[in-house]
Amino acid sequence: MKAVRFHEFGGLEKLRFEEAPEPHISPTEALVRVRACALNHLDIWARGGTRSERIPLPHISGSDISGEIAELGNLVSGHSKGEKVLIVPGISCGICDYCSNGWDSLCDSYKIVGYETQGGYAEFVAVPGANVLPIPDKFSFEQAAAVPLVFLTAWHMLVTRAHLTPGETVLVWAVGSGVGSAAVQVAKLLGAKVIATVGSDVKKEKAQKLGADFVLNHHIQDIPSEVKRLTNGRKVNVVFDHIGEATWEKSMKSMAPAGRLVNCGVTSGGKAEIDIRYVFVKQFSLMGSFMGGRGELLKVLSFFEDGKLKPVLDSIFPLMEAAKAQERMEKSQHFGKIVLKV
């Protein structure tokens, strides 16, 4: 099969469009003919060697996958060949205490498809049968690939972790990203007011169309001061952060007393200083969030079926141009999801 792989860690030049062995499936797996695969920052971290000990080489990235079932293991039920599907991006045991309570991503055996396993930058991918879900009828393959990881992450952050409620105000950093654009929609679905940030003025209108109540440029505006002004001094109840080091102090200054900061990533670095006195006096909650459970994704997909949530597509590249697609992401030129058409 055709695939984009890297054989060693490094820059964009390490990506090769080449022939690779077609995967073989076990009795509990499904072979999916990939039609579309969306990019995530995880793909860039994998190529760069972040947690390299967990990444099999040569490696095929790609966690957000849609396609058609090409083959089913004899222990997989409820699906048929030719069925249009998307892939649940997290693999877990399904039977431990964490999995049983919907906290799949805390399972000892948890893996992310396309990071610790071979992924969707290829014509075929093998995944557990439990990770295959039917695509909503009105979705194209490209739209379906734009949904799983980012909307699952946003839902887990805002609903499961931060318990965002109607009438609260949330600050969402960098809404041009896939997870940021998902967070705006989930927050509005929950009845919250959204203050969004973008890295360029050309992205402001797109953020407003997603439903953001206020949009700020985090490169040229003082975000804590603007948040204070927009909220008449009250500040925000929840901060949705996936940037890390560059935004941490600004996030802390933007929170109202008893505010909750929830973080799922560190695209700017993972080191930050905290004045613990400020945390306990203001009674802040600082929370980590990592992916989410299969049940949460099923819930999220129900909102796509009635149009309350929508995939956000930035651009579509052919598989052979995966390096160009990743370069677009690295330069933050995108708004929403960048998708590879296979």
Image (cartoon, rainbow, N blue to C red):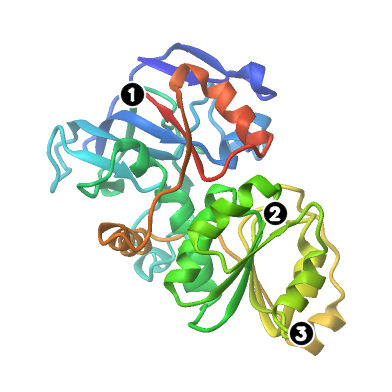
**Which of the two residues, 51 or 302, is positioned nearer the viewer here?**
302
Residue hosting label 1: 23
* Residue 180 visible, this orientation: no
- Badge 2, how many Cα within 10 Å: few under 14, some, many 20+? some
- Is label 3 in a helix, a strand or a loop? loop
| Residue 102 percent across, percent down from the top left | 38, 67
Residue at image location 37% in from the left, 38% down from the top:
65
Query: Where residue 305 sits: x, y (%)?
Result: 25, 58
* Residue 334 located left or right of residue 337: right
The picture quadrant where one finds residue 96 is bottom left
The amino acid type, in three-letter code, at marker 2 is: Ile
What residue is disc 2 on?
243
Q: Amino acid at mark 3?
A: Gly
Q: Is residue 10 among the parts visible in the rendering?
A: yes
| Image vertical order of residue 290 relative to residue 251, above or below | above
**Which residue position is annotated with label 3?**
233
Task: Give the mark nearest the N terminus, 1 or 3.
Answer: 1
* Relative side of 193 to 50, left or right: left
- Confirm or deny contact between disc 3 and disc 2 (CB under 8 A): no
Residue depicted at x 70% and y 47%: 200
**Quarter of the image that includes the C terminus:** top left
Query: Badge 3: how crowded within 10 Å, few (<14), some, or many (20+)?
Result: few
